[in-house]
Image (tube, helix red, strand yellow):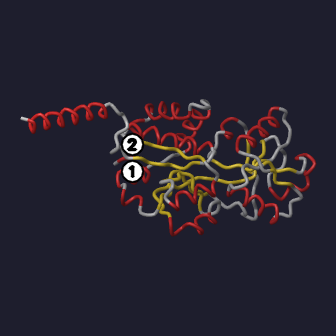
Amino acid sequence: MKKLNLLTFLIAISLTFSACTGGNKKSPDKKKVTIAMVNWIECIANTNLAKAVLEEKGYDVELVNADVAPVFAAVARGNADLFMEVWEPVTHKPYIEKFGDQIEHIGTVYTEGRLGLVVPSYVTINSIDELNSVKDKFDGKIIGINPGAGIMTIAEKVITDYNLDYELVTSSEAGMLASLKKAYDKQEWVVVTGWKPHTKFARYDLKILDDPKKTMGDAETISVIATKGWSEQNPELATFFKNFKMDDELLGSLMLAVEGNPGKESEAAKKWYEEHKTIVDAWFN
């Protein structure tokens, strides 16, 4: 009888423990995905869209925000699984060369990426090689973004290649956009480091200065990378990120939705996903 009572007691304890833990929404078996990101609007938009989609599919998604260099290092070391903002062949070439044997390419998100020095359309010059002749109008400054960004390294090379008598001002994407807006609202001259896709081209009438020396390259792709071996371990996710494709119309609307809801990027991306569910869900096939 004592053995029966002990068995009954152990079963009761087991059932009680199961009942207590069963209410926990975060199952230990829930697959976790860590996506690294940088503070560029197209990266914020695409990454938050991926988060919204994967969470609906039952994944636990963590976003890690940093500058480009530590992001590449994090993916290479396995501290982050993915990064969705790799510009090739020019912008992120140094990082690909450094970490290439520790990462793998998963897919290409966008094929018409462009880097350049960007000015409002009312500015009367059209080429980088004209900048020195109107230095005073730009106050001798090119407004850049965060110092670790690939575009900043390339902008330094532009200054050297064209022998520009300009200072490259380090800032952030938000700082660059604030400088652009302030000058644009006053119809003043300003030149910034810029790239496409970006919502600034939808908000303002801008142009990319011609680059006769091709220092800033031609069209670039925006790709997804992962820690080496990740796709083999996560075939369903690898298929999704391989098929994750954006054109100007889709990405433009997503970026505007996300940018228009500061602090609520995930909610904006989730709403956009619900409106484009047929397109996005097909990326799993």
Helix, strand or loop under label 1: helix
Determine contact: label 2, label 1, CB under 8 Å: yes
Q: Is residue 30 left or right of residue 139?
A: left
Q: Quadrant of the N terminus?
A: top left
Q: Alpha-carbon neighbours of circle 2 within 10 Å: few (<14), some, or many (≥20)?
A: some
Of residues 164 and 55, the one drawn nearer to the viewer in this rendering: 55
Residue in the image at 36% along x and 40% along y: 57
Cα–Cα span, label 2 and label 1: 10 Å
Percent coordinates x, y for residue 155 in the rendering = 76, 58
**Kind of residue at badge 1:** Leu
Residue in the image at 82% along x and 65% along y: 160
Q: Is residue 61 left or right of residue 93?
A: left
In this view, 56 is above or below 86: above
Q: Nearer the viewer, mark 2 or mark 1?
A: 2
Residue in the image at 62% along x and 46% along y: 197
Name the residue beneath numbered marker 1: 237
Of residues 64 and 237, the one drawn nearer to the viewer in this rendering: 64
**Kind of residue at badge 2:** Tyr
- Dot 2 or dot 1: first in sequence order is 2
Percent coordinates x, y for residue 89 in the rendering = 60, 63
In this view, 79 is above or below 3: below
Q: Which residue is farthest right?
A: 136
Helix, strand or loop under label 2: loop
Can you tell which quarter of the image residue 8 is in? top left
Q: Which residue is farthest left?
A: 1
Percent coordinates x, y for residue 158 in the rendering = 78, 61
Percent coordinates x, y for residue 168 in the rendering = 82, 54
Name the residue beneath numbered marker 2: 59
In the rendered structure, find residue 284 and report the number of the disc placed on it.
Answer: none
Residue in the image at 38% along x and 53% along y: 239
